[in-house]
Image: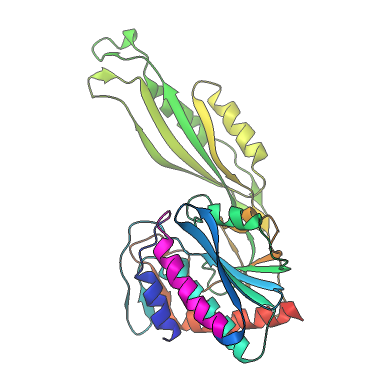
Amino acid sequence: MNVFELTRTLVDIESITENEERVGNALFAQLADLAARDGGHVERIPVEANRFNVLAWWGDPVVTLSTHMDTVPPFFASREDETNIWGRGACDTKGIIASMIFAVQELLAEGQRNMALLFVVGEERNSTGAIAAAQHPRGSKFLINGEPTENKLALGSKGALRLEVVASGRMAHSAYPELGDSAILKLLDALSALRQLPLPTHPILGASTLNIGTIGGGRAPNVIPDQASAEVFIRLIDDGSATRAAAKKAVNGKVDLNEVLLVPAVHLGSLPGFETTVVAYTTDIPSFGGNWGQPYLLGPGTIHVAHTSEERIPKREILEAIQIYKRMVKQLIQ
């Protein structure tokens, strides 16, 4: 199949986080054929029950091309028109997987070796696949991580601080609010304080941003609520320690502030001859911990349509990515 057919085949395998087994098996089969033809090796690297990373390599890997195989919900199947391939995961990151595979396939045909492909699970939730891979490095000196960057080399990516805000109170009849203690009012006060935090900025990465992503609580309209909670997501431009401390101080002990996830911002390398950009999202790169080599970040597609009902990837960018990945591999192996 050609690269567009492979992209659609991968999109059409539902692989929402924690349900990556089928797409992992499909990738293993695809890479096993490629390894058998060109003297390579392929293996499944266990992560959790029914979840595994897929690694293929030729020679002694100097460069590893890697991205994630899981997607966000909801699943919807592929379609294509003259310019785009549509579907869940089209740009994040099934089209990237296909372009990486075809780049390696073409490099092998040209006699290139000493490279690897690594496809991991769980990036969309907690990077569990990258964390597992970091415990079993294979000597690679450079990691090309694939995320939608419109085929530009990202100089950096923001980090992430995910907080759970939990308020507790005391139930009472709503006609006598003085007998209760409203958890929702406590939560609203805490969220207001968090929204007023002066968040830091960086000359390259830009400004930190804060999103209140979920909120809930209460029992009924006529009951003073005894419980309420919200989830807050802060995009970091540093290691997050100052922002975490400021958030704790802002809520002043009136609610519980639980840290769910902390991923520091990263600064990435550039290469001569490649157009550059900066991205505001978080990737698997921090979870690899440098154990698969110096990281670079590049991939076809735009993040602006990822995680949406309009997710798509331009066919032109898939073809461009194949040649860009080839150039990067050759330049890094020299």
**Could you say which is closer to the camera, residue 200 or residue 15?**
15
Q: Where is residue 158, by image quadrant?
A: bottom right
> In the drawing, does residue 14 fall left or right of residue 249?
left
> In the drawing, does residue 108 fall left or right of residue 195?
right
> In the drawing, does residue 204 fall left or right of residue 169?
right
Whether residue 279 appears in this view of the structure is yes
Please name the residue shown 37% across and 65% down the image: 88
Please name the residue shown 60% across and 53% down the image: 131
Q: Residue furthest right?
A: 334
Q: Position of residue 257 (x, y in %)?
A: 52, 30
- Relative to residue 264, is residue 63 depicted above or below? below
Instruction: Tell me where the magenta segment starts and ends, as one range.
Output: 17-36
Q: Where is residue 247, by image quadrant?
A: top right
- Relative to residue 330, is residue 252 depicted above or below? above
Q: Position of residue 227 (x, y in %)?
A: 37, 23
Q: Position of residue 159 (x, y in %)?
A: 60, 50
**Could you say which is closer to the camera, residue 56 or residue 6?**
56
Numbered-mark total: 0
Q: Residue furthest bottom?
A: 110
- Main SS of residues in magenta: helix
Its colouring scheme is: rainbow
